[in-house]
Image (cartoon, rainbow, N blue to C red):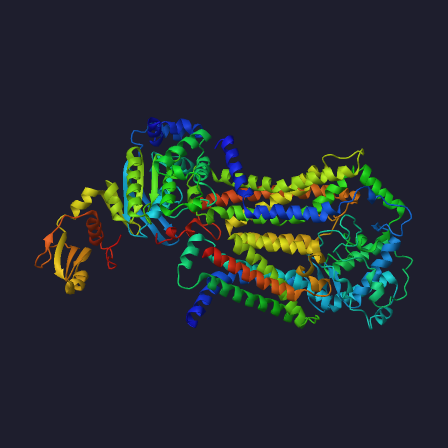
Amino acid sequence: MIALEDQLFKTGSHNDKGMPGAENQRPEVAAQKETSGNRQKIEIKKVNKYYGKKQALTDISLTIHQGMFGLLGRNGAGKTTLMKTLAALHKKQSGTITVCGIPIEQAKEIRAITGYLPQDFSMYPSMTVSESLDYLGVLSGMDGRLRRERAEMLLKRVNLAEHRGKKVRALSGGMKRRLGIAQALLHDPKVLIVDEPTAGLDPEERIRFRNLLCEVAEERIVILSTHIVGDIEATCEDIAIMNDGHILWKGTVSGLLGDAEGKVFTININKKFLAQIKKDYIVTGMLVQNEFTTVRLISEEKPEMIGAQEAEPNVEDAYMYCLYRNGCDLGGGVEG
Amino acid sequence: MTGKNFLVLYRKECRKVLCSLTFLLYAAAIFAMYYSQFHSELKGAEIKPEPGLSSYGIMVREVPEILMPCAVEGLLGEYWPNRYIAYPIGFYKEVRLTQKKRQKMADIICEITGLTREELDRFQVGGGDGSNDSDKASFEVGGENGIRQTGDNSFVVDGGGNFEAEGPKMPEYQFPENLTYERFRELMRAADDLIGGGSRYSDENIVHNFSRTPKTYEEAMEEYEQLIKEDKITGGYARLYCDYVGVLLGILPVFVAVSLMQLDRKARMEQLIYSRRASSAVIVSARYAALVSTMFLPVIVTAGIAQVKVMGFYPGMSMDNLAFARYSLLLLLPSVMVTAAVGMVITEFASGLAAILVQAAWWFAGVFSGELSGGIGKFTLTIRHNSLYKRELFMEQYGNFLFNRAFFAVVAIALVVLTAMIYEGKRRGRKIGFYTLGKNRKDQPAA
Amino acid sequence: MGFILWVKIVKTNLRHNFLPHLLAALGVALLAPVVFETSSLDGKLAAQPLEMFLSLAGALLLTPVFLPEQDENIRDLIRSKRTDHLAVCALRAVYSTGALLAVVGGFTLFMRACESAVGWQHFTGAFASAFFLGVLGFAGAGISGNVTVGYMAAMIYYIANFSLKEKLGNFYLFSMSAGDGGGKLFLFAVSLLLMAAVFEWKKVREG
């Protein structure tokens, strides 16, 4: 049974033999898939998208390989727009995107290999958990046996097996998220796109959810968008930082940390200087202890204050430093 | 998507419809209408005319000797107060003629009656207000006596008989000898043109309005025989059944369709469905098929009950076993199809409220403007035949009937195709209609 | 709570929630003279456009009272605020009823100007019918949580008035057109009771 679960859980050959309709795929698409050595990647080249006159994506170029990829940015940075464009739910105005070798314009083929978990979603409240999955499985063109097998396995995997008969309206927020990830994995996609999946989850749920994503990323591309730096830190190796429709930075987490090396400092100060410190520096953390506060801040040079010590940057510091270095307005304080 | 998968999706969509509150209300309304208007009023063999009764109802037939004086009487009754009743665009309307047109109308009346202008205008003093016959601006769902149709409860303005009692005293006149019936009808057409069309003197309305005679026993028997022999009994009953149920099918399916189409948006499930592999055509057509078939279910059930009940009245007689099924399919199914399609396409393009308003307006225009039986226009949504008899009237317009129903079935399919196109457009993030995918806050420019 | 705050709530609701429905109701009123004759009618005939057509304005104005919070998330968000959500709904019901009074009143005055024999009784009678139809829609939408069900309930009842007529007794909407015009006070009282019952039901259910 375990062997079966593992086999079902991972993306694999049964996608092609089990999915009814796979035999109907256009020959050139099938050929594209077969001949690809480097097909397990998403290539985005110079993509632009507008909402009316407002440019939502500007010259986005990215290559996303198998494993977890984190898209980090503030609310409104363009992450959701990029994710929806990758899920063939939005049209770009210019540039090219290929997902596992398939041009994004072939929406049907893209949808067959993509699982998408939107940030804001629910399901028919009167349907049970099993019925919801079954309904979405039918829309993914899966046959009955496969639907049942995968639904059963995924419900176990996301700890919802006991709740399979429960109506969606009776699920908690965390349960709904888990059902969401189950539906996105139902048709065993090669690419999983998850938009702000941990928003609104309690710490325990969040950790469980991250682990789940890491597991599923072993043999597929998982793109995770978030404004919560901790999610990226715990799960992703490759990341990109977006702001105002631009890619500010792309690379590995260690590369990002390396950039911030020597730019993060801690200092223990009297509370009365706090306002001045906030004004002069980017403060990424504070620990209040009686009259004194330990402040963590970002600075190009070591602050000329007694007791200032260089600190090991974490991803949050590095992210803030990246925004700061790119001239982003950080007046609102620490994000995420 | 394979055919098997389409069927599975169709079944799931059917289940969604069947479990919806709007469908339950719809089915309850169909059953209530069927029971209160048809089933409980159903009469069997006792409708056979008995000899020696004082009245057998009214019959419409073209008899120039009756039509001409009645029409003149009607026209005079409208000329004096200068208020003409018409249905120019299907709605009841009173028309007042300008001085110039009134002059022309006087010329027409003078030519028909042989009266001079002075003689004609002498009667104008103290003329009636002409409003006594305008109380027909309502539609009837049922006939006066349920199943019996006398023809008097038509909401199209009734015959000119009313004028005698309350209108001004009629002048003495005689038709000129050289006035032929053809010339008379020509002049009536001219009068109708002056009024702006759709008046009681138009070619379509004049016979129905002014040429009514009491039915004799023989004629009533003939009508009855026609029901028994030509309509094979059930045919007449089936048309009447369709008349009652058809009124509801011009409006209620829109609510069920709106409700189904709004479900994804309401449940915030749109994105999950948009991102699946199934094509928009498959999703939309499965939903449409589910809507039409489930909504046809209460129709076919009540039709089946009615067929059995009617057959029980006439044991041992030759009957059309499929009359109810046939009339339901031919007459009622296209109504369900087009009303559901309108609900789908407008909900997808704009909103549910817009769909309801548009369909309600269309339905209103239909039921307030048509006749209770007979007048089958090529483009009327709700076909009325509020009579157990009048088979020949229906058959005369059978060509129109078939064209009408085929037309609406085709329109319905076209609207479904349009819905699928709009759905696909929205699915790809295009801005279509008043709601777009961009309605989601996260999709706004700032995102 | 301050008066100014309530004024602000009304203003926001009028602008964001009420306008399309008001326009639809005005559309009905504007269409009435096209559909029906409105000039020089006697009392009975004059009641027809008022009862048979203007009553639809009631359904259009009162059915959507709960519409803005039909979405569960919005409802929970609104309910979490200090101002009682049902009080805001009641406020909407009040100004929707006010708008209905204005539409029916305006149309009655218009008919009067067209020399139809309409009076106070026509106005109150027509309002009672429209209000009842509206409250039916309001109740349908409120109890089901689906405004489409509300419109549907009102429409079914409207059609039932054409087929069942006087069999509906005091619940007959077109009693003035049919003759005596009785039962209007009853209709109004039942409407108020039904409205109160729906609010009570929601209060118990939503806690």
Q: At which x and y percent is residue B220? A: 86, 46
Place residue A253 in its image quadrant: top left
* B197, above or below C2, in the image: above
What residue is at 88 percent from the left and 45 percent from the top? Answer: B50
* C183, above or below B153, in the image: below
* C97, above or below A324, in the image: below
Place residue A31 in its image quadrant: top left
What residue is at 29 percent from the left and 36 percent from the top? Answer: A215
Q: At which x and y percent is residue C113? A: 66, 72
| Residue in the foreground of this view, choosing between B268 and B439 | B268
User: In this view, which residue lies farthest toward the left?
Assistant: A306
A11 sits to left or right of A271: right
One can see residue A42 in this view: no
Quarter of the rendering occupied by the N terminus of chain A: top left
One can see residue A67 in this view: yes
B426 sits to left or right of A74: right
Q: At which x and y percent is residue C185? A: 64, 67
State the count of labels. 0
* B444, above or below A189, in the image: below
Q: At which x and y percent is residue C198? A: 53, 59
| Residue in the foreground of this view, choosing between C17 and A61 | C17
C172 sits to left or right of B80: left
| Residue in the foreground of this view, choosing between B295 and B210 | B295
